[in-house]
């Protein structure tokens, strides 16, 4: 019996020739990171142990959630991080003006390579599996343990293989594929398991869409999302000066064991919208019969704040105006995305449409700041969670979608297909 | 070790955003976090619970964010342990790391009613419903996690590894 790509990485990093689902391994991590909310507890762990971090180059501290700081408490949390970085002279730290959302920043800057074992004190760490790495979110203490020892323990997961076949329809991207998938299997459909995304439709899927898909593996309860490296991966890395000799490509064996194999015909998928209050409440845009009026539209987050997301939104917003009394908030995920969007003239389109553009931050996605919802308000968001109270009032309602659907809805003032705005 | 207290019952997919909303994550102070525990799912939670009480829930308890603030808030609120049909993966690990005892038991979660008096033997995983007299079994804690507990948590385990 062979191994899946996830199992192979865990075997390689724990020095075993073979591992099976259910085994517990203590493995060497290649990268461990935390953000301004989670890092203080990890730092405390290292300090209490009274040790150095295991390898300065292999840890990263990213103040992205509540920066530029929203209040005194969040400023104090960032100070804990910054002081630790200074004291230990840690290289992988980004200050406001350089920082972006961790799961957009790390791949963009070439930190993520195929075959790596990555742990992050943030549940969306699973994003990085898009590059053929094993990446999973953990709590601050687990990541503090990794900072100190360079190791982490893992229960080797079973894997579900998803095979996406066929051609994507217009306006259908990674976000729609993953919302559709979660709609099919449910928010606990991959609990404790690895989600392996394969098939012809994935082979043709751009890297940024792959990052979006793997980002939401956690929303199905998954331990990690992963895609085997291919030409698109190699090209993406080349653009970041990462050579093929810098990494190891793992692929699933043909006789690897899967707990389930799920085939999905991509031809059948139209733009998706997940209804409140769970990502599994996904519906095709044509299945929405009621007028769902919105108060706010948010384009950004570690799910959909990358350049191609903003380009997609701009296609819809060009020569259009945001509906009266609707706020459209656009947050490029990193400084590079921000710069490039500005150069390409996307900001002109956004501002002409009546959107507001913020510096990179997680901000409203988790109800931090920069667009909090009032009682009874309705938002459409390109982020990853529509839980009760996630973006503000517990009496508000969040719908999840792609940037195209989100932008179109901002123009119409209600949830609508991009086809109705862009003829 | 035994836990005894009243059960407070919730449904499936109780996520970390309702356990401790992100608007309170500008601190890791446990007393501050405890004040807002479960606030968005049950605004009377902190008023009605007594020290030692238990949360009983359905599938996928603790889904969502990796915030350790969730088990910290629950523990600091006075809750002695959580019984659920299943737990989200990160929450499961975090609870062990934070010293919040959790028990996986479908039959307990299905049968326990709001307000039932419950007694749990943490060593055997046996859950007793003192109100109805029923007894339920929970999934045994994996060996490796028992080893972690015996090493005095992840902190003790880190010391062990670093001294090797």
Image (cartoon, rainbow, N blue to C red):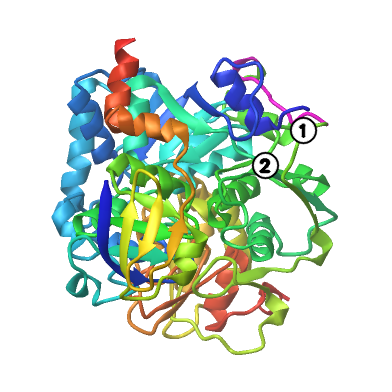
Q: Which residues are magenta?
A: A245-254
Which quadrant is home to the N terminus of chain A? top right
Residue drawn 55% across the image and 53% down it: A221
| Image disc number at residue A159 | 2
Specify the label residue A287 is tagged with: none
The magenta stretch spans residue A379: no
Residue at 73 percent of width and 47 percent of height:
A205
Chain to which the residue tagged by mark 2 belongs? A
Which chain letter matches label 1?
A: A
At 56% from the left and 53% from the top, the residue drawn is A216
Q: Can you tell which quarter of the image residue A328 is in?
A: bottom left
Q: Secondary structure at mark 2?
A: strand
Q: Nearer the viewer, residue B129 or A419?
A: B129
Taking the view exactly as shown, the residue that stands out farthest to the right is: A166
Q: Residue A142 location in percent, x, y?
A: 36, 35
Q: Seen in the image, is A146 located left or right of residue A137?
A: left
Q: Quadrant of the C terminus of chain A?
A: bottom right
- Name the residue at the bottom extreme: A290
**Mark 1 touches mark 2? (CB < 8 Å):** yes
- Magenta residue check for A249: yes
Mark 1, secondary structure of its residue: loop
Identify which residue, A300 or A36, lies in the foreground: A36
Q: Is residue A52 above or below residue A391?
A: above
Residue A230 horizontal/vertical position (percent): 74, 32
In this rendering, position of residue A177 left or right of residue A332: right
Please report the residue visible at 71 percent of the width from the left and 34 percent of the height from the top: A228
Task: Say the numbered circle drawn on residue A256.
Answer: 1
Relative to A333, residue A23 above or below: above
């Amino acid at each position: 019996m062979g191994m899946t790509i996830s199992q192979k990485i865990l075997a390689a990093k724990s020095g075993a020739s073979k591992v099976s689902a259910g085994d517990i391994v203590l493995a060497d991590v290649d990268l461990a990171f935390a953000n301004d909310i989670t890092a203080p507890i990890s730092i405390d762990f290292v300090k209490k142990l009274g040790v150095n971090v295991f390898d300065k180059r292999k840890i990263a501290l990213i103040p992205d959630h509540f920066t530029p700081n929203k209040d005194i408490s969040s400023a104090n949390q960032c100070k804990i991080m910054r002081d630790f970085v200074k004291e230990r002279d840690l290289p992988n730290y980004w200050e406001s003006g350089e920082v972006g959302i961790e799961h957009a920043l790390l791949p963009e800057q070439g930190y993520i390579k195929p075959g790596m074992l990555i742990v992050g004190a943030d549940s969306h760490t699973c994003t990085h599996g898009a590059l053929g790495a094993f990446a999973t979110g953990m709590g601050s203490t687990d990541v503090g343990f990794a900072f100190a020892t360079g190791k982490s323990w893992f229960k080797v997961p079973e894997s579900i293989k998803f095979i996406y076949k066929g051609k994507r329809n217009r306006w259908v991207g990674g976000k729609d594929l993953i919302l559709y998938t979660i709609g099919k299997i449910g928010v606990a459909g991959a609990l404790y398991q690895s989600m392996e995304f394969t098939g012809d439709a994935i082979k043709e899927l751009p890297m940024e869409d792959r990052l979006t898909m793997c980002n939401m593996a956690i929303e199905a309860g998954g331990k990690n999302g992963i895609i085997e490296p291919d030409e698109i991966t190699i090209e993406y890395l080349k653009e970041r000066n990462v050579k093929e000799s810098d990494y190891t490509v793992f692929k699933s064996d043909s006789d690897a064991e899967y707990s389930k194999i799920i085939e999905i015909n991509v031809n059948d998928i139209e733009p998706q919208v997940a209804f409140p209050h769970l990502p599994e409440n996904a519906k095709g845009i044509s299945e929405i019969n009621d007028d769902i009026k919105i108060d706010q539209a948010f384009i950004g987050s570690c799910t959909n704040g990358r350049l191609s997301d903003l380009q997609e939104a701009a296609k819809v917003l060009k020569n259009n105006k945001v509906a009266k009394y609707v706020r459209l908030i656009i947050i490029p995920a990193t400084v590079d995305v921000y710069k490039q969007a500005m150069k390409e003239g996307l900001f002109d389109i956004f501002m002409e449409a009546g959107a507001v553009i913020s510096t990179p931050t997680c901000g409203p996605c988790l109800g931090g700041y920069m667009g909090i919802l009032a009682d009874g308000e309705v938002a459409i968001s390109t982020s990853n969670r529509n839980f009760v109270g996630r973006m503000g009032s517990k009496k508000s309602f969040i719908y999840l979608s792609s940037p195209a659907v989100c932008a179109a809805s901002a123009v119409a003032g209600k949830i609508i297909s991009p086809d109705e705005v862009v003829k | 070790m035994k836990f005894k207290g009243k059960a407070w019952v919730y449904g499936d997919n109780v996520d970390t955003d309702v356990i401790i909303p992100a608007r309170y994550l500008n601190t890791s102070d446990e007393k501050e976090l405890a004040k807002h525990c479960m606030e968005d799912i049950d605004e009377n939670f902190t008023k009605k619970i007594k020290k030692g009480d238990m949360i009983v829930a359905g599938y996928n308890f603790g889904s969502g964010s990796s915030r350790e603030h969730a088990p910290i808030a629950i523990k600091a609120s006075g809750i002695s342990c959580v019984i659920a049909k299943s737990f989200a993966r990160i929450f499961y690990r975090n609870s062990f790391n934070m010293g919040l005892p959790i028990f996986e038991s479908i039959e307990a979660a299905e049968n326990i009613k709001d307000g039932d008096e419950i007694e749990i033997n943490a060593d055997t995983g046996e859950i007793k419903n003192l109100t109805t007299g029923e007894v339920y079994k929970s999934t045994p804690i994996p060996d490796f996690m028992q080893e972690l507990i015996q090493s005095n948590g992840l902190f003790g385990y880190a010391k062990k590894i670093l001294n090797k």
